[in-house]
Image (cartoon, rainbow, N blue to C red):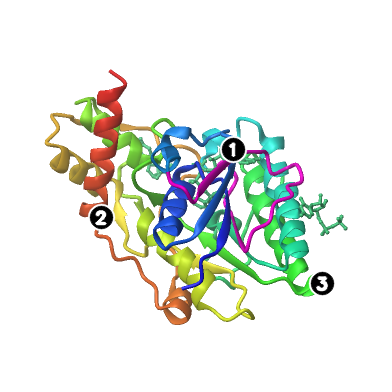
Amino acid sequence: MLKKRILVTGGSGFVGSHLCERLLHDGHEVLCVDNFFTGSKHNIAHLLGEPFFELLRHDITFPLYVEVDEIYNLACPASPVHYQFDPVQTTKTSVMGAINMLGLAKRLKVKIFQASTSEVYGDPEVHPQPESYRGSVNPIGPRACYDEGKRCAETLFFDYYRQHKLKIKVARIFNTYGPRMHPNDGRVVSNFIIQALQNQPITIYGDGQQTRSFCYVDDLVEGFVRLMEKTPDTFTGPMNLGNPGEFTMLELAQQVIDLTGSRSEIVFKPLPADDPRQRQPDIALARKEINWEPQVKLRDGLLSTISYFDNLLRSSR
Ligand code: NAD
Ligand code: UDP
Ligand code: UDP
């Protein structure tokens, strides 16, 4: 195998840190670029001693001049709590960050991967969403800084592809969970696990019959690497990556209680406005093009996530 120097932007975040680990494990050299807005040195502390891992504190809204063989562009806050904290910076990161990373890829003539999102589909009228669905996004709402930023980044990727013949790979990522997800970004998996570990009430919003499908982070990273390595240069995506296995929030709460042996009770809170009843990826394209589908069972993924949060809570006591 050819050893490559690979740039990962957002490499100290939740998904990025797992990607850095995977690429190092595959024998590559990794340059992790991050401004630590939502990322943490804790996520990559175990990699700092590795001879082929390098960390650079940098904000990708500014130009970056480095020499690498491949780029994975993940830098961007991902949860509503974080991306709405400074919405202008969120759009800048997606749009100006994409321009800078595409400019870098153009100068170096290297392949570039974009971490896009299921949020480009907005509040969808089609279930599940195939890649051909164009989405329904409110351009002036509070989520627009993220959704429209990511949509514009996709536009830039496809224009660099058409105009400058760049090799691009665009993945549309659906809800993902696993160790190193943020403890306080309000997502259901982290909320339920932290509540259960502290024997506090588990907060279900609404009646708990709404469904979601969460992909374990290792499965997602496998999808990234296959999309990048296993598809011909002419294949650009966009490609949905996510877990089609749906479960209700009530089922999730019960499973988290069982796996943690918690004494928590379940309490019901009001459902937030515009909370979708259902979200599920259509992964037919990923199955066909990269022979990919999630392998990790919810139970196993939850167990390793629970163990991560258990350690985190113990060390913060
Ligand atoms: P994260 O917040 O843990 O990671 C994002 C990283 O980017 C952080 O380390 C942050 O410090 C860094 N960053 C933010 N702005 C930056 C900037 N201007 N310059 C340099 N670094 C910057 O989020 P994540 O869950 O790991 O998400 C990674 C990528 O995947 C994001 O692009 C996100 O939009 C996408 N995504 C994630 C999910 C999910 O469920 N986690 C779903 C869809 C898409
Ligand atoms: N850029 C960068 N690193 C590079 C090359 C370019 O950060 O190695 C940035 C540069 O600042 C520019 C952007 O990428 O603003 C887009 O570059 P491109 O060559 O596409 O456009 P131009 O320089 O003509 O505006
Ligand atoms: N949710 C819940 N309790 C919580 C946090 C979230 O019941 O403590 C619900 C939320 O209303 C939604 C689902 O869980 O129906 C998934 O929420 P999350 O924010 O994780 O993801 P998203 O809604 O963006 O898919």
Residue 280 horizontal/vertical position (percent): 42, 61
The residue wearing badge 3 is 163
Q: Residue at x 45, y 44 (%)?
A: 14
Q: Earlier in the sequence, mark 2 or mark 3?
A: 3
Task: Give the residue type at disc 1.
Answer: Tyr
CB at disc 2 and ligand 3 closer than 8 Å: no
Q: Residue at x 75, y 52 (%)?
A: 100
Q: Any magenta on residue 33?
A: no
The C terminus, quarter of image: top left
Task: Give the residue type at disc 3.
Answer: Gln
For residue 298, the mark is 2
Magenta stretch? 50-77
Q: CA distance from mark 2 to mark 1?
A: 27 Å
Residue 195 horizontal/vertical position (percent): 27, 30
Q: Earlier in the sequence, mark 2 or mark 1?
A: 1
Q: Earlier in the sequence, mark 1 or mark 3?
A: 1
Q: CA distance from mark 1 to mark 3?
A: 30 Å
Q: Nearer the viewer, residue 80 or 4?
A: 4
> Is residue 44 something that shows in the picture?
yes
Disc 1 element: helix
